[in-house]
């Protein structure tokens, strides 16, 4: 029992002593009133007991249970004592309770108050450490791979194409002069088909930049397919009967680099997609080109998503951040499941049945968030922060705090019954009262 609990207990007991004194004074005043005896006789007469005298009624037992919670009990006596000018800071329970009763209250409090369950030494600490580090390092790895907050944009795009062109020539020879440029998937798409005149949004339309339509993209890269549709209309027909290279004019715009070798086409396509993936605009969300083909509202939605910056890279970044949290959760849930199976606790999959479990999740996610925080500080890159782990740790902290608060309230409410039951003077006055005393008190 901490100091606040002792103070609350003293407030309740002193408040009850005050109520007892008030009741005694009222009983004494009523006892001097002869009209009260006549009133009691009249009441008993209505019950068919005309000959019964108040003094002859046997004592009856009256049980006074706790009818309010602990908080309400403390608040009620607090207000009453303050109204009488009592300094609550100096109240103690020593002058009210004998040592035996005080010891009984302490023992009962220890029984009612939920004790913190300690962690199981090596296995809990090892599982929490492994889960936190695994989630944090996975998030860090994916953040670096996706270049979150780092090397993206036109420079990254051009650098990947330049390195890709060199690698292509080393692998397939110099037959194609500029293998990473003038690809058919970059054909110009009229603005009225896209719903926007901005050509930097061209990747959202057509199959050429949708990873869900790799077959069609390869056919374009190999020259097997020389047209595609957007919003139900042929792009070639809209550009003079043949596809035209974006950004070029005249007949030169109709010259594309195509690949007869499927391996070369695949290599060039994936390098092209990789460069676009790390560009400022990025690749569109997989499958959204089908919405563009439908035209109308669906096409408008797809274009709006891409224009607002919701790309394939941002999607993977979100999933990457989430994957670290998932790994942490899986490791700890497996650990808890093994423990519950071994101990025979059912249901086996109750992963928040104990406060200890919630503590473990909180610490593990905090470790994962700490890994991201260290990376963010050392690189001065806030995108390296593990926001998923931070949110999960915050959620577990709130859950644990609420659970402890609820358990404390429940323990205090149970304790309120003990406090009222052990008020000896109230016991003597109410439980051992005669019928005449009760009638006077009621009046």
Image (spheres, grey):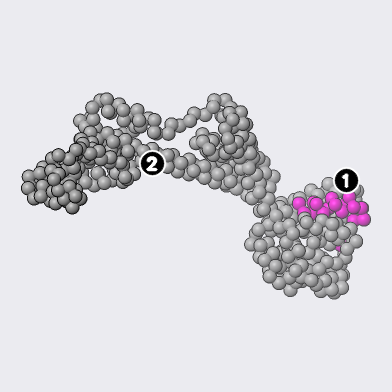
Q: Which region is colored magenta? A: 256-274
- Rate crowding at label 1 as few (under 14), some (14 to 19) or many (20 or more) other CA atoms within 10 Å: few
Instruction: Name the side, left or right, on which 72 lies relative to 273.
Output: left
Q: 63 or 115, which lies in front?
A: 63
Instruction: Name the side, left or right, on which 243 lies relative to 314.
Output: right
- Rate crowding at label 2 as few (under 14), some (14 to 19) or many (20 or more) other CA atoms within 10 Å: some
| Residue pictured at 31% horizontal, 45% vertical | 67
Q: Position of residue 331 (x, y in %)?
A: 63, 36
Q: 373 or 134, which lies in front?
A: 134
Residue hosting label 1: 171
> 138 above or below 105?
below
271 within the magenta span? yes
Q: Position of residue 420 (x, y in %)?
A: 28, 38
Gap in Å between the C-alphas at discs 2 and 1? 72 Å
Q: Position of residue 397 (x, y in %)?
A: 49, 42
Residue hosting label 2: 409
Circle 2: element type: helix
| Residue pictured at 30% horizontal, 26% vertical | 103
Camera-nearest label, 2 or 1: 2
Q: Position of residue 408 (x, y in %)?
A: 40, 39
Q: Main secondary structure of the magenta part?
A: helix
Lower sequence index among marks 2 and 1 = 1
| Residue pictured at 80% horizontal, 51% vertical | 271
> 29 above or below 269?
above
Q: 294 or 344, which lies in front?
A: 344
| Residue pictured at 48% horizontal, 40% vertical | 400
Q: 191 or 78, which lies in front?
A: 78
């Amino acid at each position: 029992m901490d100091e606040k609990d002792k103070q609350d207990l003293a407030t309740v007991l002193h408040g009850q002593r005050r109520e007892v004194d008030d009741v005694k004074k009222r009983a004494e005043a009523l006892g001097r009133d002869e009209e009260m005896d006549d009133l009691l006789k009249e009441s008993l007469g209505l019950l068919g007991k005309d000959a019964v005298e108040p003094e002859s009624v046997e004592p009856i037992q009256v049980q006074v249970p706790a009818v309010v919670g602990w908080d309400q009990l403390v608040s009620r006596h607090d207000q009453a004592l303050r109204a009488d000018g009592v300094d609550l800071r100096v109240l103690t329970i020593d002058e009210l309770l004998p040592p035996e009763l005080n010891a009984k209250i302490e023992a009962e409090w220890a029984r009612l108050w939920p004790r913190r369950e300690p962690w199981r030494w090596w296995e809990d600490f090892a599982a929490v450490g492994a889960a936190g580090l695994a989630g944090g390092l996975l998030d860090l790895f994916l953040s670096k791979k996706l270049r979150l907050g780092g090397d993206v944009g036109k420079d990254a795009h051009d650098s990947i194409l330049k390195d890709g062109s060199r690698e292509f020539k080393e692998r397939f020879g110099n037959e194609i002069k500029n293998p990473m440029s003038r690809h058919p998937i970059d054909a110009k798409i009229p603005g009225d088909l896209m719903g926007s005149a901005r050509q930097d949004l061209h990747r959202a339309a057509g199959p050429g930049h949708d990873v869900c339509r790799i077959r069609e993209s390869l056919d374009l890269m190999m020259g097997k397919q020389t047209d595609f549709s957007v919003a139900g209309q042929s792009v070639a027909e809209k550009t003079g009967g043949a596809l035209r290279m974006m950004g070029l004019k005249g007949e030169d715009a109709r010259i594309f680099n195509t690949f007869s070798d499927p391996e070369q086409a695949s290599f060039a396509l994936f390098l092209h997609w990789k460069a676009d993936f790390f560009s400022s605009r990025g690749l569109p969300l997989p499958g959204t080109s089908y919405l563009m083909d439908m035209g109308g509202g669906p096409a408008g939605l797809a274009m709006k998503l891409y224009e607002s910056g919701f790309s394939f890279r941002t999607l993977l970044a979100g999933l990457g951040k989430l994957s670290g949290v998932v790994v942490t959760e899986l490791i700890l849930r497996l650990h808890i499941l093994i423990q519950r199976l071994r101990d025979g606790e059912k249901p086996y999959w109750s992963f928040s049945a104990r406060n200890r479990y919630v503590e473990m999740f909180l610490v593990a996610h905090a470790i994962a968030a700490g890994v991201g925080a260290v990376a963010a500080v050392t690189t001065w890159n806030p995108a390296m922060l593990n926001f998923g782990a931070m949110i999960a740790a915050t959620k577990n902290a709130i859950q644990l705090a609420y659970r402890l608060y609820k358990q404390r309230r429940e323990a205090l409410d149970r304790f309120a019954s003990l406090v009222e039951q052990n008020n000896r003077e109230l016991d003597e006055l109410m439980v051992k009262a005669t019928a005449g005393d009760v009638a006077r008190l009621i009046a």
